[in-house]
Image: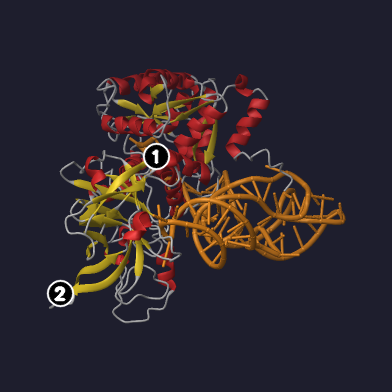
Amino acid sequence: MNTPDSTPSLDFIRSIISEDLKANKNKGQVHTRFPPEPNGYLHIGHAKSICLNFGIATEFGGLCNLRFDDTNPIKEEEEFVESIKKDVRWLGFDWEDRLYYASDYFDQLYEYAIQLIKNGKAYVDDLTADEIREYRGTLTEPGRESPYRTRSVEENLDLFARMRAGEFKDGSRVLRAKIHMASPNLNMRDPVLYRVLHAAHHRTGKKWCIYPMYDFTHGQSDSIEGITHSLCTLEFEDHRPLYDWFVNELKIFTPQQIEFARLNLSYTVMSKRKLMELVEGGYVTGWDDPRLPTISGMRRRGYTAESIRNFCERIGVAKRGSMVDMALLEYSIREDMNKRAQRVMAVLRPIRVVIDNYPEDETEYLDAENNPEDPGMGSRKLPFSRVLFIERDDFREDPPKKFFRLAPGREVRLKHAYYIKCKGMVKDEKTGELIELHCTYDPKTRGGWSDDGRKVRGTLHWVSAAHSIEAEVRLYDHLFLKPNPSDEKDGSDFKDHLNPNSLETLTSCRVEPTLADAAPGMGLQFLRLGYFCVDSVDSSTNRLVFNRTVTLRDTWAKIEKTQKPKMPGKRKKAV
RNA sequence: UGGGGUGUCGUCAAGUGGUAAGACACGGGCUUUUGGAGCCCGCAUUCGGAGGUUCGAAUCCUCCCACCCCAGCCA
């Protein structure tokens, strides 16, 4: 439209902030925060929020805090705060000295509560949880006032002090705000501010036996820290009036809460409850299972922080509930790895190839570039000898149309090596199973070049049998078969849609010798196959284990899929 | 038949009265010692629907429809 292409459009949050800055709101300061509850591991949805909050701070010359929203001691653990800090740092963000905890504000929050009581805006309620629910009314009916709502300030002060002193049992009394029991917004029907909870907190220990609720904590914490823009997800839209009510009643600095849509990704689940169910039910191996959308799982899978940041930038920020295509995430990691990953030879499902006209005891070393996208990455030497392994899938006794890999009588190029021609097959007499191939090589094609104008369509990866190393390779695929497994409207459970083949483990793979000392976590491209990384948990020099991060784009697979199956008994694509 | 939100290409997403950006996906071509990468081209006469205002509407008005969130002493 009439947008000058020199000014990239801002998302709605950045637009608001931009306007605020122009109006000199908050004296031109921008201060955000990422406020996780330490009750689980971070996932890609959190990454969106992290990139948003830290990104905005950087772009507008502001600051971003890391704050743990730790007001519910029975769900929170130190283990989670450590993993969260690790993940945020790994993603490339720095909160410097601004690490805070909502529990740092417990004393202040308690004072705020007293202030509200003194102003007649809060009262101690003796109703049970069930009664409170009953009195709250429903979506279409107004609520009723609690009989304890009219207690005197003195009595409320006394009772609240005794709540804190530990005189009352869990659940026996709560402190409530006195707002409006007939409000159409349920959050305003005298919300609970404090509950009695005789539980040790991971940071404050046994100092408290009453704990503030989220609504009574979040806005005030933002206010205390001078947060100018408090970014949260859509489900808190209904809480905004309450958020504002507290800071207004307390007459403290008022941050602006802005809500955006949380991330949904196809073929996976994002809710903490579902993730927990998968981990605890043993459907995956742990929170860092490479199939999970957790930051730790993705890191182990081989995703780079940069690729995740790029992804978060690409998906944008808006208020529309959406489902982002997993293909975009995969694009982001391919794009990043294409630039940085060293290319290596790895044969996942090996078939022996004997080069009949190659000398028995000879080994020669061939030059192989490490990355065609980046000559600066140099080259390495690859051993070549009489007996090789190539990919089983790269040979077809009866090749379909457009298949230009190896077949009887056909010639292909071995990457960085020679042209070879298939002269014969050896099969198991009983089963008819292919055991090895016999080929001849053309010595004049060393390096993979021919000067006689001969055209070879296929180029295969390979390893020298005697020099290659055995490795285990884990092939990961989508965790779910359905794009939206969380859609349970048809009565199904999300676990019904788990992909039974989300992990295939190959144990007799052969990789080139340079991989002998590959460092844990290192990302590589297995030529023609995909991007892989050395598993950071199970791999060692004695037992190499690789995880497939993502496949390469596979045009041939697409062609083959659209071809009519011409023969029965055609080899099915491995699952 | 309460309140709060959202509806623009298969998926995200710009656009804020001047005549539908971009990305992924998809299709085609070129190129290529990865059927990778790269490059080029194509891909919404139309913006949930129906009316209306206007010279002109995805943008304004009216009505309707669909979907999401809220009845924790969770966050």
The disc placed on residue A377 is 1
Q: Is A50 left, or right, of A380 in this rendering? A: right
Residue B11 location, x and y as percent? Answer: 51, 56
Q: Is disc 2 surrounded by few (<14), some (14 to 19) or many (20+) residues within 10 Å?
A: few
Q: Residue at x 40, y 57 (%)?
A: A449
Residue sitting at x 30%, y 52%: A345
The structure residue drawn at horizontal position 28% and vertical position 51%, both measured from the top left corner, is A278
Please report the residue visible at 50 percent of the width from the left and 43 percent of the height from the top. Answer: A234
Look at the image and tell me in which quarter the C terminus of chain A lies.
Answer: bottom left
The amino acid type, in three-letter code, at marker 1 is Met
Mark 2 on the same chain as mark 1: yes
Q: Position of residue A414 (x, y in %)?
A: 33, 59
In this view, A39 is above or below A503? above
Query: In the image, is A372 to the left or to the right of B18?
Result: left
Q: Nearer the viewer, residue A51 or A342?
A: A342
Given residues A152 and A515, the one toward you in this image is A515
Label 2 residue SS? loop
Q: Which residue is mark 2?
A: A428
